[in-house]
Amino acid sequence: MQPFRFDLCELPGETKGLREDIRAFLAEELRHVPKVTRAQTWSGSDPEFSRKMGAKGWIGMTWPKKYGGHERSFFDRYVMLEEMLAAGAPVGAHWIGDRQSGPLLLRFGTEEQRQLILPRVAKGECYFCIGMSEPDSGSDLAATRTRADKVDGGYRVNGTKLWSSGAHTAHYMIALFRTDSSPEAKHSGLTQFIVDLKNTDGITIRPIRDLAGNAHFNEVVFEDAFVPDDMLVGSEGSGWGQVTAELAFERSGPERYLSSFLLMVEMIRELERRGGDEGAEVIGRLVAHLVTLRQMSLSVAGMLEKGENPALEASVVKDLGAIFEQDMPVVAHELLGIAPTIGDGSDYEEVLGYLTQTTPSFSLRGGTREILRGIIARGLGLR
Amino acid sequence: MNELQTILSDSVNGLLSDRVNKALIQKAEEGVFPSVLWNEVEANGLTRVLVPEDQGGAGATWADAAIVLKAAGEHVAPLPLAEAILANWFLAEAGLEAPEGVTTLLDGDFVFQGGKLSGEAKRVPWGRDAAHGVALVKGEIVLVPLAGAKIAPGLNVAREPRDHVVLNEVAVKSAKAALPNDAMQLYGALIRACQMAGALSYLSAQSVAYANERTQFGKPIGKFQAIQQQLAVLSTQAAACGVITDFACAQVVKRGAEAAFEIAAAKIRVDDASSIATSIAHQVHGAIGFTYEHGLHFATRRLWSWRAEFGSGTEWAKRLGRETIKGGADALWPHVTAR
């Protein structure tokens, strides 16, 4: 028997109104946004857009009202997410706070932390980044070396975090630090903290240009940076378990198969323009995979709504989704053979240009393909 | 699962896991129809799951029937169970009574005049063993006795009978049914997709079990990352097929033949998965899986056969792609999210 379960999940009829509201909002907001900008989807950042979404009640949708949330269902949130992604809305600024840092604080944070931070996240005014990876700790997260040493009233932090997307604009980082360096405390020596990136001395944030020339991710260096006791998340030594739970959220959403959707749309537009049967087979296959992935992704949303833990199912969807997303520019190239371009091309050429360069990251971010398959293999009883 | 689904699942999985074994499949491949098992399958009502209760069936929906169809694939039952389920459903849709015995599907070119049917169907599943065939001719469901038909035997690579059936003015029963002209191809693709999803689920479980048993270099080969990664891929492909076939069946319940969109997606997706999954399953099993002695091939040969039946993935992809392009780039997302 398969260790994972994907029960069909139908979105309740009452989500239809929300979907229409979002489409109307996006039609207006994105009217003048170029397709290549939209292709960035959740990597695209626009604080003004985030504030508008906050005002609409579309951030922290499932959170309790007392923390600025809206107590809506996971299905409402799912509809919001997939509409934003399919349209290529610039949701990047508030993305991490909404997706994982907020839920993390709701589960493990103190009442003071929730009161202080969550209402601002829900308004679209307060942004998060993640501090997990380090120069010598990528997939092997337990090799984390950045140290948080206990001092009076808090911790003194030294070390370097790497690949922190959005750290240069974020207000806070959820960071995984080592609070116990003894060899037997490989996992139990890790602790999560909220780091105030705007008001802490001893933190240097350096953007790292990616191969496409964009600067989304950063190196964050801590030199005797002080983090107060009340910014510890959960309890000292519980970081590993919390990070694992957080990653389940990071891997579960429709962003794991829709990142190249705009290219698919532009491909269809180009074939429509050309007329005839050209490319029909290729598009048919893509549609089949798209529809399948959406149902799998919805199934995970259904598990979240029921309060179940979809960590394994989320890994399955992310692995299959990344293949789909990464195939898109390859398929587009093979089908139409139009050169990807930067800056002066058609929508199709520009979107292809952006995604051709970006897709290698899709099976790296949020857990590499190999790590995901290792998780799946463990689920199968092989490890 | 609801109550009916639990009953169906227990019934079909219980019966097939008990009765379908290597000896039985091997005999079937040598040309001996497993009549005893067929009679049990029929007595359990499994061929009539989609027939309404007042017509002597289980009154199940396609969502329920998916359980039986998948089980037929998962246990590699060498019977036209899926075909009979569909044939009997066609008959019920036309208000015709489903006969006893083996009933198969006649997907061919026919002329229907004065209550008599002439023409031919190629690659008819178990044509030689069937007492009746069901054809769809110009909106009429036709029940054809096959006793007098000219039948030339053929096989698919799973050694399942795929016979050439020629009819010459055979007296038949018929009735109109509210089905589209391509219903044979459409629902045929759906039953095959479900069987394939079942067979893929078996391939995944079997390959994992083998990797945990087989020891090389001092440990089970499943402990090697190279194998683990491959088996993870196999399992995700099987999972995807389970989902899309369930979805296609659920859409048939909801919108009948308008679910052609999802049926096409299902056949395409299982076709793609079959190529990946059969390759991995054989690679993991090594030489033993390439022998007739080991049963792996009963599933892989079925997948290689079924992926080409009732329209290959490529044919369905062309159809789905044409409709998508015709619908327009900006219509795809609203369409997908409206289902």
Image: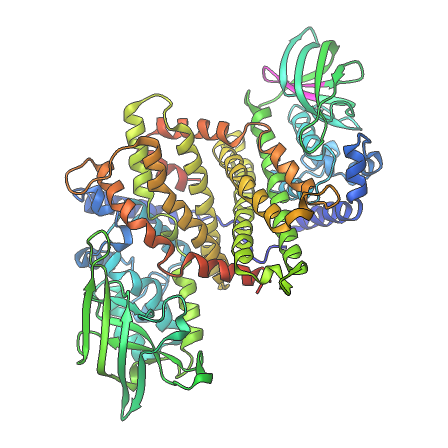
Task: Identify the image's colour scheme: rainbow, by chain, secondary structure or one colour.
Answer: rainbow
Main SS of the magenta segment? strand
Compared across the picture, whether B339 is left or right of B30 comes to: left
Q: Is residue A14 visible?
A: no
Residue A372 lies, with reference to residue B164, above or below; the image says below
Q: Quadrant of residue A194?
A: bottom left
Q: Is residue B142 magenta?
A: yes
Quarter of the image containing the C terminus of chain B? top left
Query: What residue range appears in magenta?
Result: B134-143
Q: Is residue B175 above or below residue B89?
A: above
Q: Is residue A188 left or right of residue A169?
A: right
For residue A11, above or below residue A268 = below
On screen, residue A311 versus residue A41, left or right, reads right
Is residue A61 at all visible to an observer of this figure?
A: yes
Residue farthest bottom in this picture: A152
Rendered location of residue A65, percent (x, y): 33, 67
User: Outermost residue toward the right?
Assistant: B36
- Residue drawn at point x = 27 percent, y = 93 percent: A152
Q: Is residue B303 magenta?
A: no
Question: What residue lies at 53% left-to-right and 35% top-to-bottom?
Answer: B267
In this view of the protein, which residue sits in the foreground, A266 or A333? A333
Residue A143, image x, y percentages: 39, 75
Q: Compare residues B285 and B145 and report the one nearer the observer.
A: B285
Residue A266 vs B124, above or below: the answer is: below
Q: Position of residue B157 (x, y in %)?
A: 67, 31
Task: Pick out the residue farthest to the front.
Answer: B217
State the residue at coordinates (48%, 54%).
A316
Coordinates of residue A189 in the picture (x, y in percent)? 41, 82
